[in-house]
Amino acid sequence: MKAKVIVMPKAAVLDPQGNAVRDAMRHLGMPEVRSVRIGKYMEIDVEGQDGELESRLHRLCRDLLSNPVIEDYELQKGESGNQEERKVENGSHKKTPNAQHSTSNIQQQKTKRKRKSLR
């Protein structure tokens, strides 16, 4: 089983790194950017797929990979093509829809802006 963990600062917690990236994006020609949150993404390959394993993964996320005082984590687990996703905030489990983001369009826009600025 492959587990994916996303750790993000809680909404009420200031994110100075995110603010710095937001300001840089605005400076580089993207005034539309309202906010940026910086987090951590991890992929964990584990053997097995029982209920106890999921419980241990949640404990690992809570006790080692995140700081529950200032961060929330999201645990996505599954095999290729059959992925179940669970979001955890303050210990409550909520199912959330799968979300996949493509960075290729963003990279293309960055390249175009960089070329323009070099002219």
Image (spheres, rainbow, N blue to C red):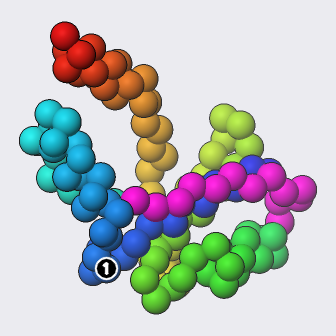
- The stretch in magenta equals 38-50
The total of numbered circles placed on residues is 1
Q: Residue furthest top?
A: 119
Residue at point 30% right, 69% down?
Answer: 16
Relative vertical location of residue 97 with respect to residue 69 in this rendering, above or below: above
Relative vertical location of residue 112 with respect to residue 72 in this rendering, above or below: above
Q: For residue 101, which quarter of the picture?
A: top left
Q: Is residue 116 left or right of residue 85?
A: left
Image quadrant holding the C terminus, namely top left
Q: Is residue 5 left or right of residue 113?
A: right
Residue at point 46% right, 77% down?
Answer: 71
Residue at point 84% right, 57% down?
Answer: 46
Residue at point 77% right, 77% down?
Answer: 56
Nearer to me, 67 or 116: 116
Q: Which residue is mark 1?
A: 13
Q: Residue furthest left?
A: 31
Q: Is residue 31 magenta?
A: no
Q: Percent x, y for residue 20? A: 27, 58
Q: Is residue 95 at least partly visible in the picture? A: no
Q: Percent x, y for residue 75? A: 59, 63
Secondary element type, mark 1: loop
Q: Amino acid at mark 1?
A: Val
How many residues crowd mark 1 within 10 Å: few (<14), some (14–19), many (20+)? few
Nearer to me, 53 or 7: 7
Relative vertical location of residue 50 with respect to residue 12 in this rendering, above or below: above
Nearer to me, 86 or 113: 113
Nearer to me, 79 or 46: 46
Q: Percent x, y for residue 30? A: 15, 37
Q: Is residue 40 magenta?
A: yes
Q: Residue furthest right?
A: 47
Q: Residue furthest front?
A: 119
Q: Percent x, y for residue 3? A: 70, 55
